[in-house]
Amino acid sequence: MFVAACARQAEPKSGVAHPFVDTVLAPFVALLPFSMTLPRRRADSLYSDIFLPEETQAIRREVRAFCDAVLAPVAHRLNTTPEAKENFPHEIMAAMAKAGIYEIPFAKDVGGRGLAYPTLATLTVLEELAYYSPSLASALYDGQAILVGKTLDRAPEHLRSRYLPQLIRGEFVGCFATSEPEASTDLSVASMQTTATKVPGGYRVNGVKRWITNSPVGDRILVLCKTGETLTMLLADMHDPGISVSAPDQKMGNHVQLTADVTFDNVFVADDHVVGAKEGSGLRTAIGALVQGRMGIGAVGVAMAQAAFDFATDYMSRRKVFGKELARMQHWQYKFAEYAIQLETARSLYQKAAIRFDKEGGADIEAAMCKVVGSRLACDMARDAIQVCGAYGFVKTLSGPGTHFPLESIYRDAKIGEIYEGANEIQTWVIARHVFGREYTG
Ligand SMILES: Cc1cc2nc3c(=O)[nH]c(=O)nc-3n(C[C@H](O)[C@H](O)[C@H](O)COP(=O)(O)OP(=O)(O)OC[C@H]3O[C@@H](n4cnc5c(N)ncnc54)[C@H](O)[C@@H]3O)c2cc1C
């Protein structure tokens, strides 16, 4: 009974648009165990994508087909195996690149798809990836495609045209480094300690960056440095002399998202690898990508909440307590009806943020709102989903029958969304600033 609750038949999918998908997916589909079926997606029957452009709906179908075939079979292993350099899913990153998933956020001149609504499509990709593995979505898409990719997209043309096509083809693993042991939320010049000192032809970088996603396997790093009284973003090669990376941090969750300390010891970076408009524009450069990144955290939160909702509602319609299914208990019916409302709200909010960003080039207030709403919902939903599923929510693997369960990892993975890419308190500060004005909020 519970095996069935874990693995349900997928809805038939249609309209897979990208020509590489069939060839990329075929070998993965062939590896699926015979009994492997996919979860039933309640969002498909509860909600409508009616106001989304056809382009975005096609991206969702395309990426869902990829995720059902490539991610679903390995998601449990990815989400429950502790961090190690050798566990980084290079093969999935390569498959994503081959399937053209890194093309989605970018313009045609660098090898992208040239979509009319690239941010909306990018967040849709994130939601689909994160439905199976939030940490893979965060590392391989929020980190790689948004934080690194979108920063390179705004870099001077010689950097953009050189590195962005490589990123889209999956040829390097990128890192985005602002946080330090003593500074993260506060990225002021006074707090930042990593320095870039001017020397003939470039800079010498010294300092330590902390929590840097993908760094244990990284090839290139965008690093925010103090240049006198300003901040400057530089692009460094992680294989250059003077850069060292610690072993991956052992975290509560997000195991695919390998983080580590990156130490810079007199590392030379050439003048033409300043990423912003000029020296001193580093904070603006970093924040530019972080606005889209935090919308991404909202979309990842929606995905986690939806996955927990799908599992729990399925389970509730099967598990009998006191002679009747949990789904017949009004307490839980109302709770899950409330969550259905919150899911629709959170998804609509991230989609609206993305559409505004695509149309107007900015959406600070919606980005802050959708990050808070999505990340909070993921935590709340995961906690209640575990509660209603009891021990079957708490367990990772039931060793007798050898059945895997997903809620344990969703609960662990949800928490970081409230903290990183601007803690939720900072997002509410941003919103309050719009309400009351800087004069009151600072
Ligand atoms: C899995 C993971 C991946 C990460 N990836 C990256 C990465 O790739 N690159 C990178 O640069 N960094 C990365 N980080 C760092 C992350 O962005 C920071 O952890 C985050 O910004 C919070 O900083 P902090 O942990 O130093 O907390 P602090 O800055 O010390 O803040 C602690 C807490 O104080 C509260 N707080 C702070 N300011 C205020 C305020 N004004 N009002 C009220 N409360 C406040 C918030 O609750 C906050 O959570 C990652 C972290 C993790 C755990």
Image (spheres, grey):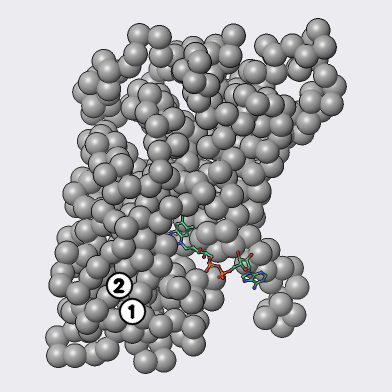
In the figure, residue 325 lies in which quadrant? top right
Find residue 34 and report its horizontal and vertical position in percent: 35, 9
Name the residue: 41% across, 43% down: 82
Give whichever of 250, 143 is nearer the camera: 250
Q: How many marks?
A: 2
Name the residue: 21% across, 52% down: 172
Find residue 230 and report its horizontal and vertical position in percent: 40, 87
- Circle 1 is placed at which residue position? 207
**Label 1 CB sits under 8 Å from any ligand 1 atom:** no
The disc labelled 2 sits on which kind of residue?
Thr
For the residue labelled by badge 1, is the local secondary structure a helix, a strand or a loop?
A: strand
- Give the side of residue 429 with respect to residue 53, left or right: right
Give whichever of 126, 418 is nearer the camera: 418
Circle 1 Cα neighbour tier, 10 Å, few/some/many (<14 / 14–19 / ≥20): many
Name the residue: 49% across, 75% down: 183
Marks 2 and 1: CB-CB under 8 Å? yes
Measure how far apart labels 2 and 1 are at the Cα level. 6 Å
The disc labelled 1 sits on which kind of residue?
Gly
Quadrant where the C terminus lies? Answer: bottom right
In the figure, residue 62 lies in which quadrant? top left
Give whichever of 90, 403 is nearer the camera: 403
Q: Is residue 145 above or below residue 426?
A: above
What label does residue 263 carry, if any? Answer: 2
Q: Earlier in the sequence, mark 2 or mark 1?
A: 1
Which residue is farthest right?
330
Q: Is residue 100 above or below residue 146?
A: above
Name the residue: 71% across, 77% down: 441
